[in-house]
Amino acid sequence: MKSGYVALIGRANAGKSTLVNVLVGEKVAIVSPKPQTTRDAIMGIITEPDYQIVFIDTPGIYKAKNALSQTMAKTTETTARGVDLILFVMDGHSGLSEGDIELAKRYSKSKIPMIIAYTKIDIMPRENIPADVKRLYEEGIECDVYPVSARKGINLKKLVAAIVEKLPEGDRVFTDDIVSDKSEKFMLAEIMREKILLKFDKEIPHGVAVIINTFEKQENGVYDINLDIICEKANHKAILIGKQGSALKEVSTFARRDMEKFLGAKVFLTTYVKVKEDWRDRPSLMDGLGYGKKSKL
């Protein structure tokens, strides 16, 4: 059988997490329109009788502005060096940028095989696709390009077939029932962070971390979840809580619904907001929140 690791590499908001979730058939990575949504390398696994693909969704590539984003960039680079195939994800809807081309050039020149997933073709003029593909080849990027839409399921079977073809022969890395390497606690924290990303604007969501304090299943089958939302500034805390707690109540309700869907059971959710000044630039705090060098999410 074919088996191997595939790193999804690309600029922020190219659609990497959405593509992984759809290919795997389950939500293994959170999604939002904002950059920095994915902070760590997250595995999503497809297992079929004749192949197993271990996708690794990596943080989007963009200019690092703090210690956290520098750590995220290192995660992407490290991941790309240890896989069997690079799936470079380009946002077709936004059009090719010079940054896209330079990144694709760099990764296509590595010793690791590469395929390009040209995404979001369901929301863009189809006539743009040939011109963009031609430009990639003219720039010396000679790997195969697959125009796809994760949301509409367009060309995904062709993409998977192409990936399988390039993987080495080997045994399964994970058992058949595993779809991700992340724990339930990790996913619950990510669900809360996703809802914050979707509800709040500008910088506040990017300065938020979520810590699960309690995750216990009661005798009645209800999960008791207690968590802290960590932000960087006191005024951010006020915004996250809202007038008489309205904002926190709303975002917690949205998160609880998705948590219940994920766990398949009722959830009693308690949330608190705490301030840790400029934690994204303080390695000791980053480590304690799960994003430092010593941490393993």
Image (spheres, helix red, strand yellow):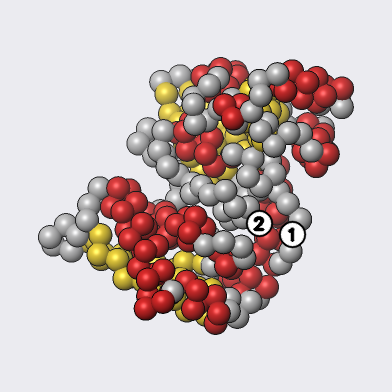
Mark 2 and mark 1: Cα distance apart in space: 9 Å
Residue 134 is drawn in which quadrant? top right
- Residue 171 seen: no
Q: Which mark is residue 72?
A: 2
- Which is more toward the observer, 28 or 170? 28
Question: Which residue appears farthest toward the front when viewing the image?
Answer: 243
> Picture coordinates of residue 149 (x, y %)?
55, 27
Please indicate, yes or no, whether residue 182 appears anywhere in the rendered image. yes
62 vs 145: above or below: below
**Percent x, y for residue 157?**
51, 19
Q: How many marks?
A: 2
Relative to residue 56, is residue 34 depicted above or below?
A: below
Q: Amino acid at mark 2?
A: Met
Q: Residue at x 68, y 60 (%)?
A: 69
The percent position of residue 286, horizontal first and vertical second, equals: 59, 71
**Badge 1 amino acid:** Ala
Q: For the residues carrying marks 2 and 1, which lies nearer the camera in this image?
A: 1
Element carrying mark 2:
helix
Q: Are marks 2 and 1 in contact (CB under 8 Å)?
A: yes
Local crowd size for mark 2, using a 10 Å CA cut-off: few (<14), some (14–19), many (≥20): many
Q: Which residue is mark 1?
A: 64
In the image, taking residue 222 as reference, residue 13 lies left or right, namely right
**Label located before the other in sequence (2 or 1):** 1
